[in-house]
Amino acid sequence: MAKFELLMPKMGESVDEATIINWLKNVGDKINEDDLIVEIATDKVDSEVPSEVSGILLEKLCEINDVIKVGEPIAIIEIKGNDIKAHSKKPKESKTVQEPIAIFQTDDLIEKANKNIDFDNSSNDKKIYSPLVRSISEKEGICESELEKIIGSGKEGRLTKNDLLGYISKNKSNISISKENLSNKTFSVENDEIKEMSRMEKLISDHMVNSKEKSVHVQSFIEADITNLWEWRESNKLKFQEKEGEKITFTPIFVMLVAKALREFPLLNVSLDNYNIIKKKNINIGMATALNDGNLIVPVIKNADQLSLLGLAKKVNDLANRARVGQLEPDEVKDGTYTISNIGVFETLMGTPIINQPQVGILAFGAIIKKPSVIETDKGDFIGIRHKIILSHSFDHKIVNGARGGLFIKRIKDLIENWETDLKI
């Protein structure tokens, strides 16, 4: 018999290591080619590593929570053949199962986030579930018929770990917690439910707390008249979709305007390393995207200032669509230099967003509402109904002073209000 080394897979050009978080097979288990062996995680996404061969799992070379470099062996599989050691020539790409690391929102996913489960699904088709999903469902006491009623967001409707965990979070109650698990935790009133944060919730929490500790958060707000832009989009959105085959939401428009302003205010497109200012050559804008299971992630539009409005619309739609089905690559949620968040999707007027480290600024776009406003003309002032939006800008006062932070969103306000109504699509 021969021995085959299963290697830590490659997960993107900028990812060189991952953490072992769960073994899906035990020593002695029979392995088929493409069976999922182990679950791994980076700080952005989780992945399930498949076997490249069929055989018997002979040895696990690492433990849960071990951090392993890409290309290093993680398990040995015994396969048929001569008594020699077989090696993978190079690490293969892992099968990505997306997990969020940031907490923002985007345009049109709220309805989808509330439709994770379909209790009226009466399909008799036999569904196939990954070993990880099987393991979680067995642990939580979820039967086969109950699994079949959960709508999957994976490829061809496959039920992912996120889908199942979202279902459990929404529908399972009265979870019994042992006294041992309650040690060193806050006290609770009788009958209160205590649930430890998931690994990703802990990462999000630490990420936000770290940002508040690292950056001196200052907020500035400004109201913009978005009437011209609103009316232009209303007049052109159907024409745009018919001509280009893409929806034109406000997100790519906001990305375009922010990218233009960042070119004029390069000190908002930096990061800090102690007292060193790292000026970013590229303008990479993170856009907030809501996932089907209610979680959130921030994919990054690289070199946003070099894309046309059509290019931005295609990129925004592509990233948002693949985010919903867990198909983002690790590199697509890295290297952002500035972030925007569309909090207006929840009819929120304004907010105080937390800076997405290691950036120095984040801009939230509030709800667009109609308001009576004073309109100045050469014939005098009069009252009219206008569409208004509030921009909420959080920036790091260690490097961005109040004047620069205020002038930055004033520039974006001017770009919004001076939108060309005759702009051709």
Image (cartoon, rainbow, N blue to C red):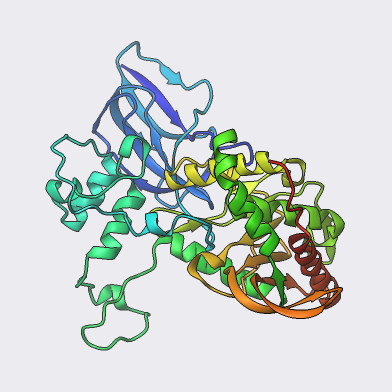
Q: Which quarter of the figure is the C terminus placed in?
A: top right
Of 280 and 184, the residue lying toward us: 280
Query: Which picture quadrant has residue 140?
Result: bottom left
Q: Which quarter of the figure is the N terminus placed in?
A: top left
Of 198 and 112, the residue lying toward us: 112
Of 214 and 116, the residue lying toward us: 116
* Residue located at (31% from left, 54% from top): 116
Report whether 246 appears left or right of 122. Answer: right
141 up-or-down from 40: above or below: below
* Residue located at (78% from left, 75% from top): 397
Whether residue 375 appears in this view of the structure is yes
Q: Residue furthest top?
A: 82
Give residue 304's position: percent from left, percent from top.
Answer: 72, 46
Give residue 96's position: percent from left, percent from top.
Answer: 45, 40
Give residue 249's position: percent from left, percent from top.
Answer: 57, 51
Report whether 127 appears left or right of 184. Answer: left
Q: Residue furthest bottom?
A: 189
Report whether 26 appears left or right of 106. Answer: left
Of 258 and 397, the residue lying toward us: 258
* Residue located at (48% from left, 22% from top): 88
Give residue 63's position: percent from left, percent from top.
Answer: 40, 47
Report whether 314 appears left or right of 196. Answer: right
Whether residue 15 appears in this view of the structure is no
